[in-house]
Image: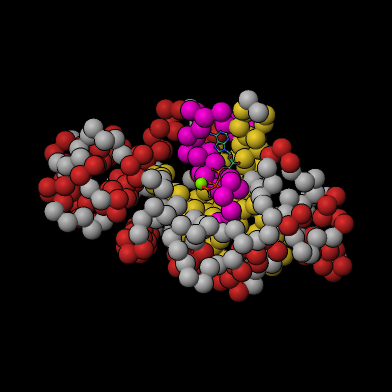
Amino acid sequence: MDNKLLEIENLKTYFFTDSGRVPAVNGVDLFIREGETLGIVGESGCGKSVTSLSVMRLLAHTPGRVVDGSIRFAGMDLLSLPESKMREIRGNEIAMIFQEPMTSLNPVYKIGDQIGEAVRLHLKYDKKKARERVIQMLKLVGIPRAEEIVDEYPHQLSGGMRQRIMIAMAMSCEPKLLIADEPTTALDVTIQAQILDLMRKLKEERGTAIMLITHDLGVVAEMCDRVVVMYAGKVVEEADVFDIFENPKHPYTQGLLHSIPKLRRKTERLQSIPGNVPTPGNMPSGCKFAPRCSHAMDVCREQEPDLLQIASGHRCRCFLYQNDLAKEA
Ligand SMILES: Nc1ncnc2c1ncn2[C@@H]1O[C@H](COP(=O)(O)OP(=O)(O)OP(=O)(O)O)[C@@H](O)[C@H]1O
Ligand SMILES: [Mg+2]
């Protein structure tokens, strides 16, 4: 248990907008062990991306700010590091790939120069050595004609190729942690499978830990060791992947699993649980899921349950089980 690479405790990230304070992440607790893949799932707006941006400290250009909690990574307190040190960690020790590769590739730089710049900065390689490394990385992620592609621009490549380039760039400095925020959502199914294979291979060969954010429970089943389920800015359940699918405890997780569409379309969202995620201005006072929960009791509308361990490696934020625990005690 002490091989935790990333540990987030009571993270609160709020946006301060003209229309008020938005508690996007409101007390998130999670950890990732070295070399493991943690899936983060939950409906749109529950705070998955904001959690990852908080880890990367990429909120500076938004009205968002971490207001409480701690983020520890490899023995460092990320929230208190100076920006210069954080810049070294970004890309070097923690890399991130986003849903839309085009937004994070610079259109005016050749592929080789973009990845090469990261390599030169982080691994302190000279230009020639960096270029060789880039070609090697492009081959590793299955880019054909790597020697030619290094001299091409992002717009000359297909979406699937660009996402491979992003992965090559993310992996080129051999990060300890890769954060992948919906890395395959924008891609068609065949390319999606190839990219997932690639991430799995990199994990196995290099022992990279992965934080995989996705709304696709099929991807979770295929890729993840452990799963965190988020709802309204908090973790509501955490368990190993087998338990999440075979023995889901939180009524929200159970709802998500029921909502897996039979014929999965790539744009399908998890939305067949009746009702909607509460809006920040309209947060229920007790359990945030209570208004949509068919098991809700009086206590659920009055108090917010804690995230408690209900079995080995299995945590759940629900009074259904806390009452059981109370009875046993
Ligand atoms: N730049 C911003 N300014 C104001 N509010 C924001 C900003 N970015 C995110 N939020 C708010 O933070 C909350 C969480 O957003 P986040 O992007 O983390 O959701 P998500 O779980 O990643 O959803 P999705 O599955 O759609 O990607 C949302 O309610 C959103 O409105
Ligand atoms: Mg998101």
Vertical order, 107 against 306 (above or below)? above
Badge count: 0
The percent coordinates of residue 216 (x first, y second) are 49, 61
Farthest residue in the top direction?
18
The percent coordinates of residue 212 (x first, y second) are 47, 55
Q: Nearer the viewer, residue 139 or 32?
A: 139
- Residue 60 lies in the magenta stretch: yes
- Residue 45 lies in the magenta stretch: yes
Vertical order, 106 against 261 (above or below)? above
Q: Magenta segment, which residues?
A: 41-67
At x 36% / y 39%, what residue is drawn? 103
Q: Nearer the viewer, residue 317 or 72?
A: 317
| Residue 197, image quadrant | bottom left
The percent coordinates of residue 120 (x first, y second) are 24, 36
For the N terminus, the image quarter is: bottom right
Scheme of colours in the image: secondary structure
Looking at the image, residue 294 sits to the left or right of residue 238; the answer is right
| Residue 206, image quadrant | bottom left
The reply to whether residue 314 is in sight is no
Farthest residue in the bottom direction?
246
Vertical order, 319 against 149 (above or below)? below
For the C terminus, the image quarter is: bottom right
At x 59% / y 66%, what residue is drawn? 259
Looking at the image, residue 309 sits to the left or right of residue 140; the answer is right
The reply to whether residue 54 is in sight is yes
At x 87% / y 67%, what residue is drawn? 327
The percent coordinates of residue 134 (x first, y second) are 21, 46
At x 45% / y 49%, what residue is drawn? 181
Q: Nearer the viewer, residue 31 or 292?
A: 292
Ligand 1 shown in quarter: top right
